Image (cartoon, rainbow, N blue to C red):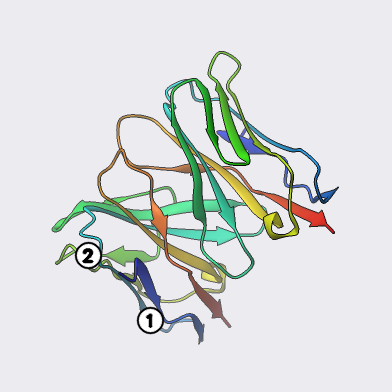
Amino acid sequence: NAGVTQTPKFQVLKTGQSMTLQCAQDMNHEYMSWYRQDPGMGLRLIHYSVGAGITDQGEVPNGYNVSRSTTEDFPLRLLSAAPSQTSVYFCASSRAVDQPQHFGDGTRLSIL
Amino acid sequence: QKEVEQDPGPLSVPEGAIVSLNCTYSNSAFQYFMWYRQYSRKGPELLMYTYSSGNKEDGRFTAQVDKSSKYISLFIRDSQPSDSATYLCAMKDNQGGKLIFGQGTELSVKP
């Protein structure tokens, strides 16, 4: 039981490049979400999903896309990377919306 | 004004001290309250999860929620160097899963 697995752990991009951050969970959790963590800002919700085929926007969704084709996977796509998207990205999952969320160890993304 | 306010610290205490960490919030609809511990270069790890007001104890950790004052606390008894981490409060209402986090308090426990 690996929990929430995020790949890659580190990535450096150039402005304008696109990439996908991967998130997978093996706990059969329905609820999954993406956060970014910036100094002095805490964790902020980007997008979330309450089940396969259902996604919605969080607090800071601009510049990011998500999809949820399976229960296990919830990838986050950066369409055209900007320096303002330099951050640490965390994926989380929970059994249901009202249950506590469990986090992966993050992807550290730097955009030059 | 942020929905959740948390003093970022840093907070430094000697080993064995009682630590008090606090958050205030403005949204009276919040019903679920959590404390996460985050070690450097790791993801947040759930420590305590409470619903509505009251106390909850788990080993050396006690979480308190005072909804009338919109104030939550985490107490750590007999603090250990291994407790050195950033502690994040988080909360949400009963309408969905959107967690709102505090900034986090950096704690250092000195041997």
The amino acid type found where label 1 is placed reads Ser
Which disc number belongs to residue A92?
none
Label 1 CA crowd tier, 10 Å (few <14, some 14–19, many 20+): few
In the shown orientation, is residue B37 left or right of residue B75? left
In the rendered image, the residue lying farthest to the top is B68
Q: Nearer the viewer, mark 1 or mark 2?
A: 2
Marks 1 and 2, how far apart at CA = 16 Å
Query: Where residue A97 sits in the image (x, y, percent)?
Result: 28, 42
- Please name the residue shown 27% across and 66% down the image: A74
For label 2, the residue is A67
Is residue B2 at least partly visible in the picture?
Answer: no
Q: In terms of image quadrants, where is residue B97?
A: top left
Q: Quadrant of the N terminus of chain B?
A: top right
The reply to whether the C-beta atoms of the residues labelled 1 and 2 are less than 8 Å apart is no
In the shown orientation, is residue B16 left or right of residue A59? right
For label 1, the residue is A18
